[in-house]
Image (cartoon, rainbow, N blue to C red):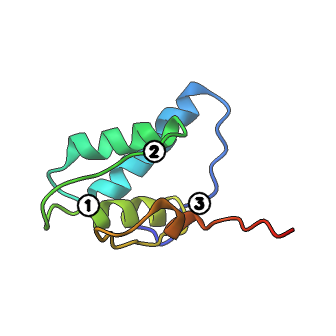
Amino acid sequence: MQESAPSTVIHTPADAKAATERLRTAVHSVIVGQDRVIDEVMIALACGGHALIEGVPGLAKTLLVSTLARSMSLGFSRIQFTPDLMPSDMTGTEVIEE
């Protein structure tokens, strides 16, 4: 797998299909046996949406996301959730002072 993906410009549906297949091949070279999850996460990314990946330990959830990020030359960071974690712990809060 490449450490950083080459720049891809998509002008036609054929370009989009080729780019998708390159990404799928790169991810499948690292992740084995999770075809449906890989496809669903790629669909979420293509739609500009979000994906919540849940599962027991050892299913390559973190590896999948880090591999996708690396294959697309994107940043990746991981947050370990705890019972007391609030959304504002990740997004921050705005304090209004008068």
Q: Is residue 18 above or below residue 75?
A: above
Say which label, 2 or 1, has the lower sequence index: 2
Tag 3: amino acid: Pro
> Disc 2 versus disc 1: distance between alpha carbons?
14 Å
Q: Is residue 1 left or right of residue 77?
A: left
Residue placed most toward the observer, 4 or 65: 65
Residue farthest toward the top in the current orientation of the protein: 13
Camera-nearest residue between 70 and 95: 95
Residue 74 seen anywhere in this rendered image of the structure: no
Relative image position of residue 75 (x, y in whole percent): 54, 69
User: Looking at numbered disc 1 in the image, what kind of residue is underneath it?
Assistant: Lys
Residue identifier under label 1? 61
Mark 1: secondary structure: helix
**The quadrant where residue 73 appears:** bottom right
Q: In the rendering, which numbered label is found on residue 10?
A: none
Name the residue located 31 percent from the left edge and 60 percent from the top edge.
64
37 is higher (above) or lower (below) than 29: above
Q: Nearer the viewer, residue 94 or 13?
A: 94
Q: Which residue is mark 3?
A: 6
Q: Is residue 48 visible?
A: yes
- Who comes first in sequence, dot 1 or dot 3? 3
Q: Which one is closest to the eye, mark 1 or mark 3?
A: 1
What label does residue 50 carry, if any? Answer: 2
Question: How many residues crowd around disc 2 within 10 Å: few (fewer than 14), some, or many (20 or more)?
Answer: few
Which residue is pictured at 14% across the width and 67% down the height? 57
**Amino acid on which the number 2 mark rests in the picture:** His
Where residue 17 sits: x, y (%)?
48, 33
Q: Give the image location of residue 60, x and y in percent.
A: 21, 63
Q: Residue at x 53, y 64 (%)?
A: 88
- Please identify the quadrant where the C terminus is shown: bottom right
98 and 55: which is toward the camera: 98
